[in-house]
Image: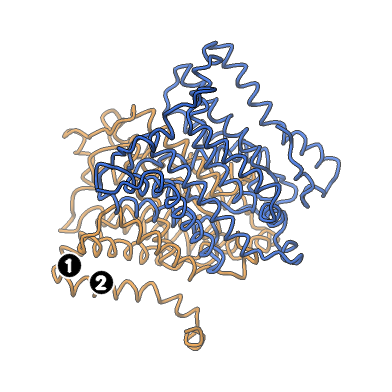
Chain colours: A orange, B blue
Amino acid sequence: MRALIDSIGADRIRQYLPLATLVILVIAVGVAQPAFLEPATLLQLAADTAVLFILATGVTFVIMLGGIDLSLQSMASLASVIVALTITRLGYGAFVLAVAVGAIVGLLAGLAHVRLRIPSFIATLAMGGVLFSAALVISHEQSITLGEAERGYQTWITGSVAGVPSVVIVGLIVLVVAHILQSRTAFGRYSAAIGAGEPAAYASGVKVDRQKVIAYALSASFAALAGVILAGRLSSGSPTLAAELLLPSIAAVVVGGTAITGGVGSIWRTLVGALIISVVRIGMTFLGVNIFAQNIVFGAVLIIAVAITIDRSKIPIVK
Amino acid sequence: MTPSADAESPRASASPKSAMHRFRLASWAPVIVLVLLCAVIAVINPNFLSFGNFVRIAQAAMIPLVLGLGATFIILMGSIDLSVEGILTLSAVILSLLVLNGANGNDLGLLAIPLVLLVGAGVGFINGAVHVKLKVPSFMTTLGTWFIGVGVANALLGGTAVRINDKLVRALAISRDPLVGLPWGVWIAIFCFFVALVIQNYTRLGRYIYALGGGEDLAGLSGIRASRVRIMAFTLAGVFYAVGGILAAAQLGLGNSQIGLGRLFTTITAVVVGGTSLAGGSGSVQQTLVGVLVVVVLSNGMVLMGIPPSVQIGVQGLMIIAAVALSMDRKLVRIVK
């Protein structure tokens, strides 16, 4: 097995494995259930993937730097509560408010991480607790349903343009923006450099801390946007709305081929990863696997994907 | 609470004077915080000092303590274990399905307990083996097993909750001993504490765990088989979480998939508030005991003061940040990821 991998080139396998997996999965599900390959079903798949993709895109920025964000599901839930509570008064401003709160939260988490030198997984785990608590308090521990009047503001999420669900278009805009940020800006290149080798990046004059804070602010802002969209799709806001999305989001990034050690990865890979997760979910639902038990598969997929993509030369001692 | 003898970890000797100073302050700060906290709450609400409230605190502390003991060994190695809720939920659900219950015909009684402990050990072993053999960082491995554990529990339950009808099992958490009047579960937790203390101080595993946390490369050069120690530590932690799962199921009288909710957070808060360093190598189960008491007394005090429980998780989050920020030896850590 090892010899075979060596002969083809492990890097090349790593590069194309996610895309090949996606194609095989789509064909497998399509063979089992031909209706799956109809355009309407595929568009529905894209619409259902949008929230997951946006969450995963945000955390991709952080993972590229070699960090992690474990607060994204709490941030998304909090954003849904903010929208549900303020949309009557603020209208479209509620969405802006929710994303702005996300940016500030990410800024604070990033500052706690770089200034206080707290490892990112613990800083964001703690931040997640604070956000969950905040969402519980402002929502009075209840799920808030959006009324008919407020749903008018949600057409950019729930409506459709020329037969394409609006949420797919929003997802594509996020893809373009995130791709430009990641591949065409100084921030994107510095992120990759920091992920590839932080001491070298630091030595070449990259303002490491600033790039990190920007990455965490982006991650939380995207999580907030995902929460806003989720609130629109489910017509409600609740402190636990996105609670089940942490694992699939991180799994999407890793399955797409972005290494958690940082430096290697892209938004495109995350798109492929998010689609894989969605197709696997549909396949499992088709097989009749309980929605909660699906986490067994995602947990296993996460570990296997990390084991394949991780760059062990960067971590001589694995802790 | 005596400061433990682990002061001489390699990193503490970098600059003797300041390191010594930091060590003294760092190891006593949680105790001081605990005493101050008790004093302030007692002044605001004298009910805090009643025997009834003491029992309530002990009862609230028993599960976090057992979980914290397991997590301490992992954090001492410089690793992290996010699978606390997964193993606890799985253990609680399996226990509820093995004893006299409302869902199937099983009636193993107390015999179910060793089986559940084995399940905990098994999942812990998987954590350790995957982490070491596949070289996957522990936070990713255990993030995976966290959700796998809850997922398996859900699959076993089929989306319902299982009532525990076995009186003896329920008595573990509810009945009180005739002498002091504490629930048996508290005594179980105290017993676990002493077991952990013995493992930490008087076994090779305990010393090796400190050695790995202090510097794995050095430990390896001195002939310690790091991967074996790691697997054993994760297995041990799994057993402690399984005890936590048994106590949680006995306390609630149910096995359901939400039984672990929020427990990872409390566990990590307790360990880091106690002063055990996330970098590994310094800390102890005694410090975790203090950390658990700080967390439990604080939430008990907040209840007495009428602060809603939903605020508590946020307060714990801020405590994690504060405790980690205060305990990090920043001069020695250039890169934090």
The three-letter amino acid code for the residue at tag 1 is Phe
Return the residue nearer the eye: B321 or B248.
Answer: B248
Nearer to me, A247 or A151 = A247
Q: Determine the CA span between mark 2 and mark 1.
A: 8 Å
Q: Quadrant of the C terminus of chain A?
A: bottom right
- B144 w.r.t. A116: above or below: below
Q: Which mark is residue B259?
A: none
Residue A241, picture quadrant: top left
- The residue that appears at 62% across and 54% down in the rendered structure is A208
Tell me the subunit letter for badge 1.
A
**Chain to which the residue tagged by mark 2 belongs:** A
Give the residue number, with chain letter if any, for mark 1: A36
Q: What residue is disc 2 on?
A: A26
Asked if the residues shown at circle 2 and circle 1 are in contact, with their CB atoms under 8 angstroms apart, the answer is yes
> Does residue A267 sit above or below B31 in this rendering?
below
Question: Observer-nearest residue: B155 or A9?
Answer: B155
Residue B203 appears anywhere in the view: yes
Does any portion of residue A101 appear in the rendered image? no
Which of pointers 2 and 1 lies earlier in the amino acid sequence?
Answer: 2
Rendering coords of residue A181 (x, y %): 46, 58
In x, y percent, where is residue B93?
Answer: 35, 47
Question: What amino acid is found at the position of numbered circle 2 in the picture?
Answer: Val
A93 sits to left or right of A122: left
> Element under label 1?
helix
Q: Position of residue B326 (x, y in %)?
A: 67, 37
- In the orientation shown, which residue stands out farthest toward the right? B17
